[in-house]
Amino acid sequence: MPDRAPHATSTTESGSFCTARCACGWRGPARRARSQARTDAERHLSDAPAGPPAGTGAERPLE
Ligand SMILES: [Zn+2]
């Protein structure tokens, strides 16, 4: 996996649920198990392109 991938995933716990998030703005479904959220994150990294789209300008969603 390339180190320069713009994706940086993390998991956020909310109540009894855990959600995977990524620096690119992606967010996974709420999971009851953190391990499932991590699996979602890994799947996102696998599905995501190796780099940002060229020319369109990377937009970040407002928090
Ligand atoms: Zn991402």
Image (cartoon, rainbow, N blue to C red):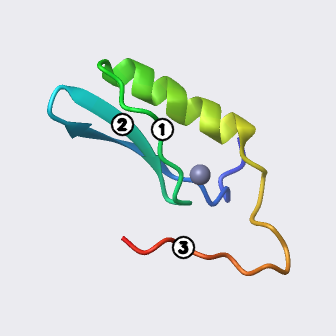
Mark with earlier residue (2, 3): 2
What's the residue type where badge 2 is placed?
A: Thr
Q: Which residue does the numbered mark 2 point to in the structure image?
A: 19
Residue 14 figure quarter: top left
Quadrant location, the N terminus:
top right
Badge number at residue 28: 1
The residue under the point 40% across, 44% down is 10
- Front position in the image: 51 or 16: 16
Mark with earlier residue (1, 2): 2
Which structural element holds mark 1?
loop
What's the residue type where badge 3 is placed?
A: Arg
Which structural element holds mark 2?
strand
Within 10 Å of disc 1 (Cα), the crowding (few <14, some 14-19, many 20+) is many
Residue 38, image x, y percentages:
45, 28
Residue 2, image x, y percentages:
72, 48
Residue 12, image x, y percentages:
29, 42
Labels 1 & 2 near each other (Cβ < 8 A): yes
Within 10 Å of disc 3 (Cα), the crowding (few <14, some 14-19, many 20+) is few
Quadrant location, the C terminus:
bottom left
Which structural element holds mark 3?
loop
The residue under the point 72% across, 46% down is 48
Residue 18, image x, y percentages:
30, 31
Whole-angstrom CA distance, mark 3 to mark 1, is 17 Å
Is residue 24 found left or right of 4 in the rendered image? left
Whole-angstrom CA distance, mark 1 to mark 2, is 6 Å
